[in-house]
Amino acid sequence: MRLHEATEYEARPIRAALVERQPELLDILEADARLQVSSFSGLPALLETAQQPDFELIVVRQSYPDQFPPADVERLIVRFPLARIICAFETLCLADGRRREIWPLAVRVPSWGLPERLEREVAVLRKSAASLPLTATREEIVRFDSSLPCLAPDDQLPGGLIYSGDPIWAETLRCLLAEWTGRDWQITAEPGELPKDDSLRCIIDVDPLSGKLQRRLHELLHSRSDNGSEAQGVILVTSFPWKTKRFLAASECKAAVVDRLNLARIVSPIETLTR
């Protein structure tokens, strides 16, 4: 491929299909200027309407177990053999990969992990990353979803502080951040050691959200926000986002909230940590 052809290829919108229309999911896809999105009410509508198998990316929303017949899923894979497929499933479908395998494990991602998987699949389609095969093992899937972007030296992030009562989780995250940023990250389990100024980036595991931690968080978040804006340089990590968001609302604070098991989401967004 010649250089001008590669540039033209990267500038061309990716033809994407969304199955099972849902406002939030549609907003995510349509807001991405790299995608040219067509939406369909279900798999039969996609399979019967599309005249040519030319979709490069297909995103399917699964709301409940056994929503899609195995025959339709197989037809989809056969009809679009070169497309990158993502099945974004909701909470009710968490056990599907253990009890049934209607969808290949390689295409299944929880709905909260869609933005990260979408970035990786776009990179695959832009020929800047290796693809994940449909027959990938669980180990290969974890490695693919945990892959980190490479940073140029000038883009390296500063170090920071990880607060958590879970030493194994904290050490795992510290190693990932140290490898990615090239900086040292400290760990503490004492709320009183959270910085009183904005000199350090903070990743705070708020499970459990004790009274002592709530008081310290209230001070920290207010000191790092301006006129009700989101606190700068702070990520709150939790297994109970609804509980954390309720605390933020009661405290009249705003902060980034991320699922604590979604390490890729914590580690990868440069803009979140450098604000």
Image (spheres, helix red, strand yellow):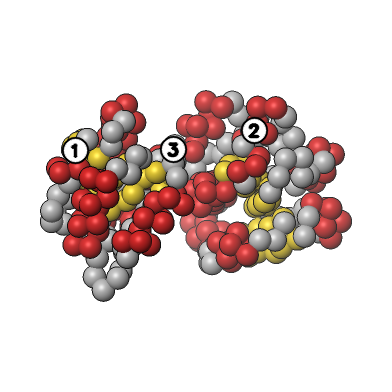
Q: Residue at x 19, y 38 (%)?
A: 190
Q: CA distance from mark 3 to mark 2?
A: 17 Å
Tell me which corner region of the image, top left, top right, bottom left or bottom right, holds residue 189: top left
Which badge, 2 or 1, comes first in the chain's sequence?
2
Q: Residue at x 27, y 50 (%)?
A: 214
Q: CA distance from mark 2 to mark 1?
A: 36 Å
User: Label 2 sits on what residue type?
Assistant: Ala
Q: Residue at x 44, y 41 (%)?
A: 239
The answer to which of 88 and 78 lies nearer the viewer is 88
> Is 212 above or below relative to 274?
above
Mark 1: give few (<14), some (14-19) or many (20+) Cα within 10 Å. few
Looking at this view, name the residue that lies furthest to the bottom. Answer: 227
Q: Nearer the viewer, mark 3 or mark 1?
A: 1
Q: Are marks 3 and 2 in contact (CB under 8 Å)?
A: no
Element assignment for label 1: loop
Q: Which residue is mark 1?
A: 190
> Is 196 above or below relative to 175?
below
Mark 3: give few (<14), some (14-19) or many (20+) Cα within 10 Å. few
Q: Which residue is mark 2?
A: 95
Q: Are marks 3 and 1 in contact (CB under 8 Å)?
A: no
Mark 2: give few (<14), some (14-19) or many (20+) Cα within 10 Å. few
Q: CA distance from mark 3 to mark 1?
A: 21 Å
Q: Which residue is mark 3?
A: 261
Which badge, 3 or 2, comes first in the chain's sequence?
2
Looking at this view, name the residue that lies furthest to the front. Answer: 211
Tell me which corner region of the image, top left, top right, bottom left or bottom right, holds residue 71: top right
The answer to which of 156 and 145 lies nearer the viewer is 145
- Residue 245 bears which disc, if any? none
User: Label 3 sits on what residue type?
Assistant: Leu
Which badge, 3 or 1, comes first in the chain's sequence?
1
Residue 95, image x, y percentages: 64, 33
